[in-house]
Amino acid sequence: MKKSKALFARAQRVLVGGVNSPVRAFRAVGGTPVFVGSGRGSRLVDADGKSYIDYCLSWGPLILGHAHPGVTRAASRAAARGASFGAPTEGEILLAEEIRRAYPSMERVRLTSSGTEAVMSALRAARAWTKRDWVVKFQGCYHGHADSLLVAAGSGALTLGRPDSAGVPAAWAKTTLVLPYNDVAAVEAAFKRHGSKIAALIVEPVVGNMGTVLPEPGFLEALRRITKRHRALLVFDEVITGFRLGLGGAQAKYRITPDLTSLGKIVGGGFPIGAYGGRREIMEQIAPLGPVYQAGTLSGNPVAVAAGLECVRTLRRTAPYGKLEALTRRLARGLQEAADAAGVPARVQTTGSMFTLFFTPHLVRDYPTAKTADTKRYARFFHAMLAEGVYLPPAQFEAAFLSAAHTPADVERTIAAARRAFKRC
Ligand code: KE4
């Protein structure tokens, strides 16, 4: 870690907190953030040359693993043709067609440069369409750092939100209702009382940002039913789940058709991208066709699009999801058995190729139950695993991921490392 320590000291003299996104600073687990030199397949190599099996995978995008040859080649060739034109290119059409093929609900698509932009723009379209201002979100779900979404639950479940970040005007937080995840009664009550003001309800259909939390049977169906009844729009934030839970994400897995969807991460193959889309009549409000303004210098960037297109086409061609899910289930079972054998209260929750090891014996079904997790113990476990050459997400309330490059040997090695790490945390 010698080089990471030196780099971190230098970084903090010019970059805020030494990082370009807060969670990378290891504040949730303590210690010096690992500065990465390179990645290949399932492996990360740090600035000191130490190799790790990586289950963070850049917070989700790298479902094919680091430096996938096809994705790297596609990006390199696109870059050699010119990094950006600020003009339409054929690649953007091809990626949008691939998105619509996997997400038929996205009848019209707009590419952006991040998930935050995709979510922010989808909600602007929803407000314009319904001519209403309020948005419902769920406690523990994260949808990027747009002001009106950096909101914590109000004092009571039915009171409007309060800013969850400095710099967010109270007035903007007051257009957001924050409800408990997996609580249909709370959603019913909120719409009964405020339905005529609610433009949209946005949800992570499978939550990654509390750690991996699944929708209980009937929850997503209820969101679809209630929003429809009150003529509000249902927005699936599939920035994590899109192309992760299968080509069609959560909406295909749970057979729910949202009105709008946001994508990011995997759809760019590790390059800066976001996308939003939905019903044609809603999306055709967006400039230049309609009155909702949204723009971006690098939206649909040719290099990011080439990488995303190769990534999505490779997923469609190789269909890795069955193998990925089986390997993830094996890892989850092995970690659970290792925790149980060590007498450590822990619970592994998983779906598809995402998982979270919660340091709590309770089923994690919402934010309050997620918060029963022992974050200090997670931090000790994280560092014990880091010492073993396994890189987990440096925060308890995040999802971990496998890639198509992870092997059964990686997983068995990880389980063996966990058996030792549980004894030390
Ligand atoms: P970006 O603006 O970071 O591309 O996407 C925002 C976003 C939107 N929706 C969901 C469900 C997301 O998970 C995210 C971003 N995820 C976080 C970690 N879970 C990114 C990591 C970070 O903030 O550095």
Image (cartoon, helix red, strand yellow):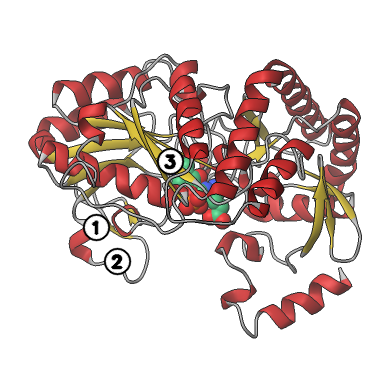
Which of the numbered marks, if any, corresponds to residue 173? 1
Name the residue located 20 percent from the left edge and 29 percent from the top edge: 281
Above or below residue 365? Residue 293 is below
Mark 2 nearby-residue class (10 Å; few <14, some 14–19, many ≥20): some
Mark 1 nearby-residue class (10 Å; few <14, some 14–19, many ≥20): many
Residue type beneath disc 1: Ala
Quarter assignment of residue 337 = top right
Q: CA distance from mark 2 to mark 3?
A: 24 Å
Cβ atoms under marks 1 and 2 closer than 8 Å: yes
Q: Does residue 353 show up? A: yes
Spot occupied by residue 9 in the image (x, y as percentages of width and height): 73, 81
- Asked whether, in this view, residue 163 is left or right of residue 32, the answer is left
Residue at the bottom extreme, as displayed? 13
- Asked whether, in this view, residue 286 is left or right of residue 101, the answer is left
Q: Nearer the viewer, residue 408 or 275?
A: 275
Which of the numbered marks, if any, corresponds to residue 275? 3
Is label 2 in a helix, a strand or a loop?
Answer: loop
